[in-house]
Image (spheres, rainbow, N blue to C red):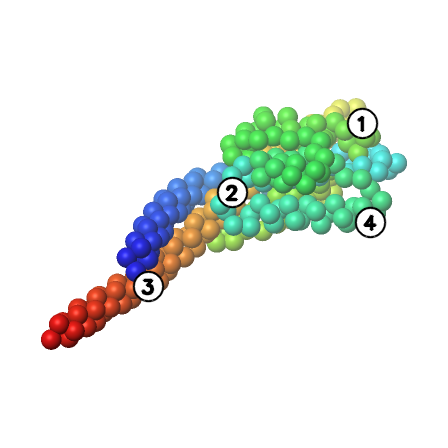
Amino acid sequence: MGNNLKDIRKQISSVLNTQKTTRAMKLVSTSKLKKAEEMARRSRMYAGKIVEVLEEIKVKVASGENVQENPYFNAGNKDSKLVDIILVTADKGLCGGFNINTIKEVNRIIAEQKEKNLKVRLRVIGKKAIEYYKFNEIEVLDSVVGLSATPQYADAAEFVNKAVADYLNGVTSKVILVHNGFKNMISQEMKVSQLLPIESITLSEECASVLEVEPNEQENEILNELAKKYVEFSMYYALVDSLAAEHSARMQAMDAATSNAGELAKSLTIAYNKARQEAITTELVEINTGVESMK
């Protein structure tokens, strides 16, 4: 019985130590979430402005044919059977189903593309997805670690432009971006967007027609430059959005782990007290039995 009590005490101590760790991780994630959420909010506003300007310029160029022929907006190389998928996961775990949900969505898209007789290439951001595909012996064309944890515009642009170059050169017909995005403090949402070709963008009614683009030989260059900026910033925003969602998911996971640790410690304490009471009762019975036998 003594060994049993000792084991329970060790378990209680271990659970309480784990609870301290998960509580600290929750507080850290909560702090980081506030910063990431603000960064995502500002990035979302900037992305909205890019979309508005891009659509307005697209509408004001001399003819619709220029847009249709523009490599960023047309269907790319229709003969190509290749599709690039860019996915974003975290470098770390302990954030519930955040990473695996993104991987599951990508696997679903891969199966969907294969049904259309298309081949998929993976460009992976985040250690967790890299490890998953390496373990499952699935080929990854391009990968990077550290970018999802500390998003930088220049690094994001450099990564996505590799996929853009293949698309513009006719190697691929489509570029798809997948990430788990921030919805609110307690939930995330899977986001799948087609980066290239750029799909129809609806111009906001509130967007004032303040741009005047005269029809000339440079109109396509303007459209190209803005489309390039749109794709680059979409990649950067996905990283920022994913980071906020990651901290949100980890905060929830650590909160649940802290609560579970508390419940487990409580049940172990009850078991310990019960075992201790049984040990005391047994000892009293043995003492009484010994006293009776001596009479």
Taking the view exactly as shown, the residue that stands out farthest to the right is: 79
Is label 2 in a helix, a strand or a loop? loop
Q: Which residue is mark 2?
A: 93
Instruction: Name which residue lies at 42% across and 43% down.
Output: 29
Front-most of residues 256 and 51: 256
Name which of mark 3 and mark 4 comes first in the sequence. Answer: 4
Q: Of tags 2 and 1, which is closer to the observer?
A: 2
C-beta proximity under 8 Å, tags 2 and 4: no
Of the residues tagged 3 and 2, which is closer to the observer? 3
* Distance (Cα) linking label 3 and label 2: 32 Å
Mark nearer the viewer, 3 or 4: 3
Callout 2 touching callout 1 (CB < 8 Å): no
The crowd level at tag 3 (other Cα within 10 Å; few <14, some 14-19, many 20+) is some
Frontmost of labels 1 and 3 is: 3
Q: Amino acid at mark 4?
A: Glu
Q: Nearer the viewer, residue 126 or 172?
A: 126
Question: What mark, if any, has residue 169 been given in the picture?
Answer: 1
The CA distance from mark 2 to mark 4 is 32 Å
> Which residue has dot 3 on it?
271
Spatial separation of the CA atoms under disc 1 and disc 3: 68 Å
What's the residue type where badge 3 is placed? Ala
Where is residue 2, by image quadrant? Answer: bottom left
Residue behind mark 4: 115
Q: CA distance from mark 1 to mark 4?
A: 25 Å
Q: Is residue 3 left or right of residue 134?
A: left
The answer to whether marks 3 and 4 mark residues whose Cβ atoms lie closer than 8 Å is: no
